[in-house]
Image: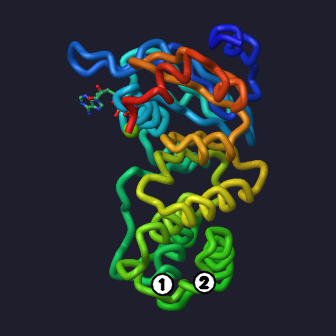
């Protein structure tokens, strides 16, 4: 199915995420042009494309880090196009970054606990002297979900790189997210860590949808049910993983080489 047909078949109020005609220009450069995309609640989708295709810019528009030059974005039916990032986070949108943003001097548990406390309402107090049991319980569950149970008391700066990426996923899971954007979570991971990542992503609660940007097709195509291909800032193909994998145009443009 081409992108226009797939988009028109999914124009409905029930989408988790709905982009219409999103364009982002930097001066004369159009980083993304007229991107129209719908994702259902709980749907897991990959956005693939070579370097410079506009994938991270698309994420920045969805999170509110960039305001689009044109178009609109709905999150669970609400127009969030011009909302600041924290208003989108409050509505259950999360992201992980290509570059790590952890408290490296604190333990794994402290990092996750602080993330849980940061997003929990009515509990925000930097002076709170005692740990909150419910939040501790939530933090422990998230640490288990990202396979860091044995490392919960270790200092984050001493963890392996792959473990730090797992911790980032735990932070993205804090505070009942409804939708997560993963930007190249497998970058720099060993084969074993990649298998771990696939296991973590595929066992997330089914109501949590996500979009994953990922160069490693072995990871990307195993953790999603739909794929959007981007090239030069535009969507040029959408389909199921097996359709994308077998598509000659995709193989020529993307798998053929030049991405990295
Ligand atoms: N903040 C920015 N200012 C100017 N140009 C940018 C900015 N961010 C991205 N771009 C440009 O937009 C295009 C798409 O970049 P990006 O979204 O990072 O691609 P991808 O994530 O697919 O590799 C590139 O040409 C990039 O140089
Ligand atoms: Mg990028």
Instruction: Give the left or right position of residue 169, taking residue 9 as reference.
Output: left
| Colouring convention used in this rendered image of the protein | rainbow
The residue at 56%/69% (across/down) is 116
- Residue at screen point 60% across, 84% down: 132
- Kindly identify the residue that appears in the image at 39 percent across and 23 percent down: 68
Label 1 to label 2, Cα distance in Å? 9 Å
| The image quarter in which residue 249 lies | top right
Q: In the image, residue 176 lies at what x, y percent?
A: 66, 58
SS category of the residue bearing label 1: loop
Foreground disc of the pair 1, 2: 2
Answer with the quadrant where ligand 2 appears in the image: top left
Q: How many marks?
A: 2
* Residue annotated with mark 2: 132
Residue located at (65% from left, 40% from top): 221
Q: Position of residue 122 (x, y in %)?
A: 58, 68
Residue 185 position (above or below residue 242): below
Q: Name the residue that disc number 1 marks.
A: 128
- Vertical placement of 10 versus 188: above or below? above
For the residues labelled 1 and 2, say whether their Cβ atoms are less than 8 Å apart: yes
Image coordinates for residue 206, horizontal then vertical, percent: 78, 51
* Figure quadrant of the N terminus: top right
* Residue 156 seen in this snapshot: yes
Pick whichever, 45 or 250, lies toward us.
250
Question: Dot 2, crowdedness within 10 Å: few (<14), some or many (≥20)?
Answer: few
Give 236 or 219, whichever is nearer the viewer: 219
Is 4 placed left or right of 235 in the picture? right
Position of 2 with respect to 236 (left or right) is: right
Residue 78 visible within the image: no
Q: Quadrant of the C terminus?
A: top left
Residue 124 lies, in percent from the top left, at: 50, 71
Packing grade of label 1 (10 A; few <14, some 14-19, many >=20) is: few
């Amino acid at each position: 199915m081409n992108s226009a047909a797939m988009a028109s078949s999914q124009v409905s109020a029930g989408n988790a995420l709905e982009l219409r005609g999103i364009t982002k220009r930097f001066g004369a450069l159009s980083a993304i042009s007229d991107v129209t995309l719908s994702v259902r609640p709980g749907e897991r989708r990959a956005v693939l494309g070579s370097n410079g295709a506009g994938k991270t810019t698309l994420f920045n528009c969805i999170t509110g880090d960039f305001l689009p030059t044109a178009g609109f974005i709905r999150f669970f039916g609400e127009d969030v196009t011009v909302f600041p990032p924290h208003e989108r986070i409050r509505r259950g949108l999360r992201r992980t970054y290509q570059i790590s943003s952890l408290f490296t001097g604190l333990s794994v548990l402290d990092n996750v606990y602080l993330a849980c406390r940061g997003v929990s309402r009515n509990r925000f107090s930097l002076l709170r002297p005692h740990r909150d049991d419910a939040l501790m319980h939530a933090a422990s569950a998230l640490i288990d979900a990202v396979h860091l149970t044995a490392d919960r008391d270790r200092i984050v700066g001493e963890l392996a790189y792959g473990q730090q990426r797992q911790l980032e996923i735990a932070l993205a899971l804090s505070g009942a997210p409804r939708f997560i954007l993963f930007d190249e979570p497998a970058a720099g991971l060993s084969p074993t860590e990649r298998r771990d990542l696939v296991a973590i992503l595929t066992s997330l609660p089914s109501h949590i949808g996500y979009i994953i940007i990922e160069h490693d097709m072995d990871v990307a195509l195993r953790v999603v049910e739909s794929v959007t291909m981007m090239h030069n800032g535009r969507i040029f193909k959408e389909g199921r993983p097996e359709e994308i994998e077998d598509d000659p145009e995709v193989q020529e443009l993307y798998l053929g080489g030049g991405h990295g």
